[in-house]
Image (spheres, rainbow, N blue to C red):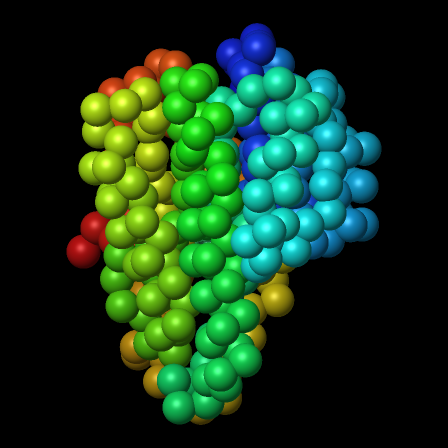
């Protein structure tokens, strides 16, 4: 990881899912590059680790972002503490592999609540502040939002929604000072992948090609793309999905 010193001086970022994986790497990098970060997650112990590793200004807030009121409170907290908001990184998410006929109502709602609802409601709360700051929203989608994947119907649905939310917001704010874009990682070495369980008896012909021969990315790889895309240098990147997927969606 090659830090760009002072790239985020004077900027304030709210990063969700910042207790581990991609969100943690992103929050740490923005802080190391001079930004002030409010790191959000439901995992208090993970957030403590993020705070302990931070080189720079990083505050934490334990928040279950499935609740729209909590999303609003988190944005209020950031603006009260730091006085402005430049960057919203929607990184928090869960993944689960199941036969579609086994998906319970509870599992369906849980996936949608964090992967989709939280992205929407925290963006809704953040937008008035981001508009004042010429700000940016970056949503972490997935290659699973671009291509259909067997045994992951609800995850694919949720990430497809994140991509269309990104594009629709980009259209709505086309003439105003707000950028919105998505990053679509594929296999990235995080707790989410390490804890991923494939159900018994699946047809591996249908899922084998979702792992790239080029291997897995690291959280820091995705954070590096995020930190370019959220910077002023990326001022003309709006409404797109930037894939960082070791070629999975190439063919
Ligand atoms: N790891 C991959 O291979 C991969 C691939 C494509 C997309 N993604 C996406 O990247 C994002 C980050 O995932 P990761 O791989 O870093 O996994 P991760 O499990 O390390 O991080 C996800 C974080 O989200 C948090 N979270 C879950 N539910 C929450 C809630 N209700 N409120 C607040 N926080 C909550 C978790 O506590 C965790 O810290 C996710 O949106 C995921 O779908 C990951």
Q: Is residue 128 visible?
A: yes
Q: Is residue 171 above or below residue 230?
A: below
Locate residue 104, reporting x and y percent. 50, 86
Which one is nearer the viewer's eye here, 57 or 130?
Answer: 130
> 235 or 95, which is in the foreground?
235
Q: Is residue 177 left or right of residue 72?
A: left
Instruction: Tell me where residue 168 appears, x and y as whole percent.
Output: 25, 45
Instruction: Please state the horizontal and vertical placement of residue 194, each as a whole percent of the image.
Output: 60, 62
Quadrant including the C terminus: bottom left
Name, please, the residue furthest toward the left: 251
Q: Position of residue 91 (x, y in %)?
A: 51, 46
Indicate the quadrant containing the N terminus: top left, top right, bottom left or bottom right: top right
| 49 sits left or right of 132 in the view | right
Residue at (34%, 66%) from the top-left corner? 157
User: Quadrant holding ligand 1?
Assistant: bottom right
Where residue 152 sits, quadrant-wise, is bottom left
């Amino acid at each position: 990881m090659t830090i760009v010193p002072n790239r985020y001086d004077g900027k304030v970022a709210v990063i969700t899912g910042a207790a581990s994986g991609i969100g943690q790497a992103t929050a740490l990098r923005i802080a190391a590059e001079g930004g002030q970060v409010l790191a959000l997650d439901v995992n208090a112990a993970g957030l403590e680790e993020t705070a302990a590793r931070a080189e720079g200004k990083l505050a934490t807030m334990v928040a279950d972002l499935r609740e729209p009121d909590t999303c609003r409170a988190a944005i209020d907290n950031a603006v009260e503490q730091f006085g402005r908001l430049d960057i919203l990184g929607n990184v928090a998410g869960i993944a689960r592999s199941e036969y579609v006929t086994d998906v319970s109502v509870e599992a369906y709602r849980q996936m949608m609540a964090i992967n989709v609802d939280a992205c929407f409601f925290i963006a809704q709360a953040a937008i008035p502040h981001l508009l004042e700051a010429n700000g940016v929203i970056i949503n972490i989608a997935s290659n699973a939002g671009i291509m259909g994947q067997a045994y992951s119907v609800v995850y694919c649905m949720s990430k497809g929604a994140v991509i269309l939310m990104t594009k629709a917001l980009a259209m709505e704010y086309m003439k105003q000072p707000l950028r919105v874009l998505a990053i679509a990682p594929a296999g990235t070495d995080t707790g989410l992948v390490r804890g991923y369980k494939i159900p018994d008896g699946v047809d591996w012909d249908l899922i084998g090609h979702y792992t790239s021969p080029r291997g897995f990315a690291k959280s820091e790889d995705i954070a590096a793309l995020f930190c370019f895309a959220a910077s002023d240098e990326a001022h003309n990147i709006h409404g797109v999905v930037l894939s960082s997927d070791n070629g999975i969606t190439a063919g």
